[in-house]
Image (spheres, helix red, strand yellow):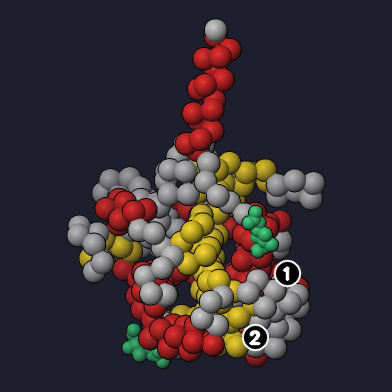
């Protein structure tokens, strides 16, 4: 009797803590996020050393997005290997990341897409720098590949920017969900009303925020009063990346105690720069 009861409980837990997660795809998109830190002259040729080798097939129809005011950057291209348009946002370069983390402010502004929603002002501003280029490049490439898949990705600040691209890309896609949205080491983007709104949209068929061990960035800006930032649903929390099987927890709900919030102390910049066990800082240094 007791064991049947336990079985039912564990089945219930299993059914409510899972969502579709494709680790192979997440790893490929991490490779595209890593490459975004490379110099565009190498990126354009898909010849950026170890960063580009994570996706040896590369991209065609490449557009580089860049706005010099805040050095916002990203790229769009078509991957024949995935039959997908891939949209990537770049974060802060590794040699500035420690300062970026230390200086991260908590200023919010009103978010136009939903009521009582506030988002981090700096992240939103950074995204808006690229918005018009994103719309133009995406519209062009979509005309060329009208039925391909669409993937969106980004790491760190680039992850926050990728959140802001979702309503835009969704609309440009005829209000149809894109195929996959995975990002890495994302900070919190907005308040709880924003996160709730985001969770209710049908922006992507599969999506997740992927976090690594003691990466500090997913803990910022703080959830605590008076800051009150809040994550969106679907977290994949890696406790280690190892050759014979990565270890992760899947948390359906945001701010779950079994995922990144299980870390009381999260201050490892190294973990922020070692998704999928790669040394992002070294790869990026060799493609400048
Ligand atoms: C996961 O993603 C990879 C790479 O895009 C793809 O080849 C594979 O079919 C996907 N697996 C599932 C179960 O969808
Ligand atoms: C840079 O960003 C600003 C602010 O969003 C925008 O007005 C401007 O058009 C952008 N420049 C380019 C080249 O996209």
Identify which residue, 54 or 204, lies in the foreground.
204
| Circle 2 Cα neighbour tier, 10 Å, few/some/many (<14 / 14–19 / ≥20) | some
In the rendered view, tell whether residue 112 sits above or below residue 47. Answer: above
Q: Residue furthest top?
A: 1
The quarter of the picture showing ligand 2: bottom left
In the rendered view, tell whether residue 257 sits above or below residue 222. Answer: above
Q: Residue 166: x, y in percent?
A: 41, 68
Say which quadrant the N terminus sits in: top right
Residue 240 visible? The answer is: yes
What residue would you read off at disc 2?
60
Q: Residue furthest left?
A: 115
Task: Give the residue drawn at x 60%, y 80%.
Answer: 78
Which is more foreground, mark 1 or mark 2?
A: 2
Q: Residue 187: x, y in percent?
A: 45, 58
Say which quadrant the C terminus sits in: bottom right
What residue would you read off at disc 1?
54
> Quadrant of the rendered structure where residue 6 is?
top right
Task: Give the residue drawn at x 56%, y 20%.
Answer: 7
Residue 126 visible? The answer is: no
| Circle 1 Cα neighbour tier, 10 Å, few/some/many (<14 / 14–19 / ≥20) | some
> Quadrant of the rendered structure where residue 225 is?
top left
Helix, strand or loop at label 1? It is loop
Total numbered circles? 2
Task: Give the residue drawn at x 42%, y 75%.
Answer: 173
Identify which residue, 273 or 152, lies in the foreground.
152
Task: Give the residue drawn at x 57%, y 46%.
Answer: 237
Q: Residue 4: x, y in percent?
A: 56, 14
Helix, strand or loop at label 2? It is strand
Numbered label attached to residue 216: none
Q: Is mark 2 within 8 Å of ligand 1?
A: no
């Amino acid at each position: 009797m007791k064991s049947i009861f336990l079985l039912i409980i564990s089945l219930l837990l299993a059914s409510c803590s899972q969502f579709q997660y494709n680790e192979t795809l997440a790893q490929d998109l991490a490779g595209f996020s890593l490459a975004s830190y490379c110099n565009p002259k190498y990126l354009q040729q898909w010849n950026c050393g170890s960063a580009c080798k994570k996706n040896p097939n590369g991209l065609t129809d490449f557009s580089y997005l860049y706005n010099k005011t805040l050095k916002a950057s990203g790229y769009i291209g078509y991957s024949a290997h995935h039959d997908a348009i891939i949209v990537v946002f770049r974060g802060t370069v590794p040699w500035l990341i420690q300062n970026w983390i230390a200086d991260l402010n908590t200023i919010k502004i009103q978010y136009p897409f939903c009521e009582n929603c506030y988002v981090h002002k700096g992240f939103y501003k950074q995204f808006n720098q690229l918005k018009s280029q994103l719309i133009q490049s995406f519209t062009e490439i979509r005309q060329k590949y009208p039925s391909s898949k669409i993937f969106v990705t980004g790491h760190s600040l680039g992850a926050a920017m990728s959140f802001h691209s979702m309503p835009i890309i969704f609309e440009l896609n005829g209000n149809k969900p894109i195929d996959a949205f995975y990002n890495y080491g994302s900070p919190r983007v907005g308040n709880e009303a924003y996160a709730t709104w985001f969770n209710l949209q049908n922006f992507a068929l599969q999506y997740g925020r992927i976090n690594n061990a003691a990466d500090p960035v997913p803990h910022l800006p703080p959830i605590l009063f008076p800051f009150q930032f809040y994550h969106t649903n679907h977290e994949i929390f890696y406790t280690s990346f190892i050759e014979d099987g990565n270890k992760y927890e899947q948390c359906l709900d945001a701010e779950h105690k079994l995922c990144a919030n299980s870390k009381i102390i999260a201050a490892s910049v190294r973990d922020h720069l070692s998704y999928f066990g790669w040394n992002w800082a070294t790869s990026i240094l060799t493609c400048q």
